[in-house]
Image: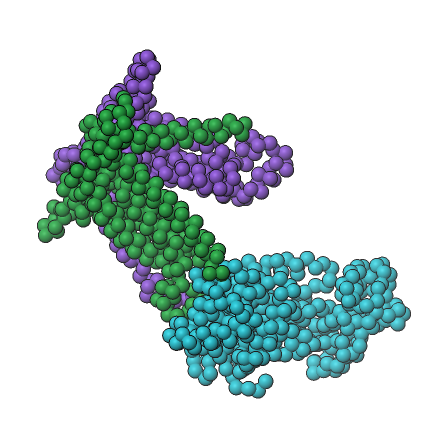
Amino acid sequence: MKKLSHVYMWVVFALLYAPILVLVLFSFNRAGSLNHFSGFSLYWYRELFRDATALTALRNSLVLAVSSSLIATVIGTLAALGIDRTRSKFLKGSLTSVTNIPMMNPDIVTGVSMMLLFVAAASVPFLPVRFGFTTMLIAHTTFNLPYIILSVLPRFRQMDKHLREAALDLGCTPAKTFFKVELPAILPGIVSGLMIGFTLSLDDFVISHFVSSPDFQTLPLYVYNQTAHEIKYSMYALCALMVFAILALLLAVNFAGAKGEKKQKNGGAA
Amino acid sequence: MNKRSFLERFAAVPHTVWAVLFILAPLLFVVYFAFTDTYGNFTFDNITMLSSYTHIFVLSICFALIATAICLIIGYPLAYIISQLSPRRQKLLVVFLMLPMWISLLIRTYSLMAILDNGGLLNSLLVSLGLDKIKIVGTSGAVILGMVYDFLPYMVLPIYTSMSKLDKRYYEAAADLGCNSLKTLFRVTLPLSLPGVISGITMVFVPSISTFYISQKLGGGSFDLIGDTIERQFKNVSTYNIGAAISLVMMILILISVAVMNRFSDEDEGGMIV
Amino acid sequence: MEKNKLIELKGICKEFDGEQILKSIDLDIHDKEFVTLLGPSGCGKTTTLRIISGFVSPDSGDVIFDGKKINDVPPYKRLVNTVFQKYALFPHLNVYENIAFGLRVKKIPDAEIRTRVKEMLALVNLRGFERKNVNVLSGGQQQRVAIARALINEPKVLLLDEPLGALDLKLRKDMQNELKNIQAKTGITFIYVTHDQEEALSMSDTVVVMADGKIQQIGTPTDIYNEPINAFVADFIGESNILDGVMISDYKAKFAGHTFECLDKGFAPMEKVDIVVRPEDVDVVAPEKGMLQGVVTGVTFKGVHWEIIVDIQGFKWMIQTTDYSAPDTTIGLYIEPDAIHVMKKSEYSNMFGDYSSFSDEFDELSDVESVEDEEEAKEE
């Protein structure tokens, strides 16, 4: 029974990873075909890096992901603080429900709704709304917000409320208390929220699809356009690169997490 | 603490403004567009016209339900198996499970297509073995397979999380009271992991029913799902209104079913504590 | 204790969710005094403490500190510091930085901080713990850090909110002595909140017994124990047999069907009163020699003494004696005049039955933690 269950598990994992492995493997195939492997080559990678549009898309993606996740983190952390301290249950409830809408809604509805908002706003005279970076930034910040609030709010809840009082008791003003005591306590939540926001933004295709413009393309949009008609093998290279980047990021986070834990454990001896 | 500081009092204001402007207002525009014509006049035409899209709704719901069911059937045992491993291996496998979630859906769908396509890896393998090619891309099976493949981790992870949170003493208590491992699974693990199942179902069903990339790629253009339909309407200004109407109906359908599911799981949790 | 008044509470009232937690509290606290607020959970003692520290502002009444009204002074400007119930040490700072926290906020130069932290660590017996992570310290060590962190600011008053509640019994006893020593060494006024009557009696100069949002009695530990003002105090502090009685005249009280000599006077003739007889003040004698006779219904060995439950006309007395009496035997009881304490009738009369069962008391003990949290939760 135990053996069988392990076999089952590894089969599911193998199937889950097979397409990704195939993609990575064939990105090194000079032949540009899935029918035969003509030898290891970085040809498609060179091809990719010759593609100026791809590089611009990469830069756009990074700029967008950094800025939207940062903005969302600031607004979201403040919001989590505000929600945590709100006494009215009704206010608390309605604020969190509204916040969660982009998370519950299918991406396509969120994308469409934002698109309609921007279309309507663009028709207002004197309101300089153009589809592109600004609309993308607003959209990405919006769908990042619930995730940030969701990862920071529990930190406020878990925090020993006497910590605040202890700081006030020892002479900190409320503002100082926030920065000296509360912020360090919720920092892990903020960091993980920031990371989630960054990757969500980097990864988003559906919402971007509706609020972007041809002159502001992100990587997923570029992939979408490239894969619209026929298979391009430089896309294999791009996808493989993205897989490597995510793998590196995930490993780094795990490694950093493990190291952080260790550091805390050894804190006394250090 | 009686008095809240200035910071505490107004910290949520920027977010509130943001939420009103960019969460609520856009939804109001969906409603507005759904109930107006191209000239901004009030009309029910968009809603009544939806009846001609019934088959699309039905097809999408069927596909999404089947994909969700398959994910549950594959994912539940997997989550259970992982939760029974040693903590270190659990951690490792969770990372393995999350890795595909971090890889863009486009890439994963695309790579799946690269394998299943007519000239893809699978068929060239079959040919080299002297067998006939099989047409996979373009069939309904391929679309459902794509959904299952893309969203399986979203089913496994919440179920696993709810299982791993279970107090190990429940298992010991069940064993003590005469349950073998199978009976424990059905009498203890299953009911207690129900909240995870519910959230897994939502996390698979919602993206499945609204997808358009999967059906475009793996359906080979022969299947029109709600997502495809909505996406098409928004390519042209003249069909924004009907697109908004379809979106509105889909959103309401999904929000209702999510709310019902959550209520269901909440009640169950409450019952379990008592 | 005729020193200058440091803190005065005048007519303090506080309500949470429509529930009156404090009903007009008047309390003077003097310089260098060790004051304990003692009472069962929900009696308002923690709220009183939080009003002094500034985390709760009273609905009415004045908080006066050194002659000045401080109702509206925020906690961070008050010259008091608190040792919190579960210590509330900052998890992101080590022992040194936790203790230095208050001085850092005041921008004291590093060199001075260093010497003062060192002094504090010496005071609380934690030399060499500077760089330790507070999360790996034992409960007792965390406790000491919390005390040092508060004391380093040289507060006029140190507030301690059930500081020993989370420690085991042995450690509690040690820390009680240590706290007492620290108070003697520093000469700082301590206001100590506890529900543990033994702790209150052994540590305090003054005990303030609270119940139902009111102060029941203020006095030295011996006063409180020997001269409880009403049935509540008598029952809460130590063990006691509380009986209905009548003052026949001065120095003559009638209860349990017998008229006793006593030392109390000043009651109206035939006034109904509550009588307290402590279990250790009753002598067991032969039935014919006793003022009262009863049947032993239970005997429990307590180490130093036996605890005997005796049924006298249907009322179960508790008696602590070094002599064993077998169950179901009839014994006589002898009570000296000075062992009888007469109290006026109060709202608490008849609330405390005899020793038919102990279960209530145990329930209350196990509930303490949760009810206490509830009290604080209401303030949010």
Rendered location of residue B266, percent (x, y)? 45, 42
The letter of the purple chain is: B
Query: Is C262 on the left-hand or right-hand side of B27?
Result: right
Circle count: 0
Is A197 placed above or below B192 here? below
| Vertical side of A200 occupied by C88: above or below | below
Locate residue B157, reporting x and y percent: 42, 38
Q: Locate the N terminus of chain A and report the quarter of the image it occupies.
A: top right
Query: In terms of depth relative to the viewer, which is nearer, A270 or B179?
Result: A270
**In the rendered view, would you say A200 is above or below A180?**
above
- Find the residue positioned furthest to the left: A125
Q: How is the image coloured?
A: by chain
Q: Residue C68 is drawn in which quadrant?
A: bottom left
Image point (23%, 27%), residue name = A32
Quadrant of the rendered image containing residue B38: top left
The chain drawn green is chain what? Answer: A
Q: Note whether residue B53 is visible.
A: no
Rendered location of residue C357, percent (x, y): 72, 58
Foreground pick, C58 / B73: B73
- At horizontal 66% and vertical 78% (from top left) the residue drawn is C223
Left or right: A130 as drawn, with respect to C1: left
Quadrant hosting residue A83: bottom left
Relative to C355, say whether A143 is above or below.
above
Which shade of the palette goes to chain C?
Answer: cyan
Is any part of residue C263 visible from this angle? Answer: yes
Image spot of residue A96 (x, y percent): 35, 50
Residue at image coords 30%, 44%? A200
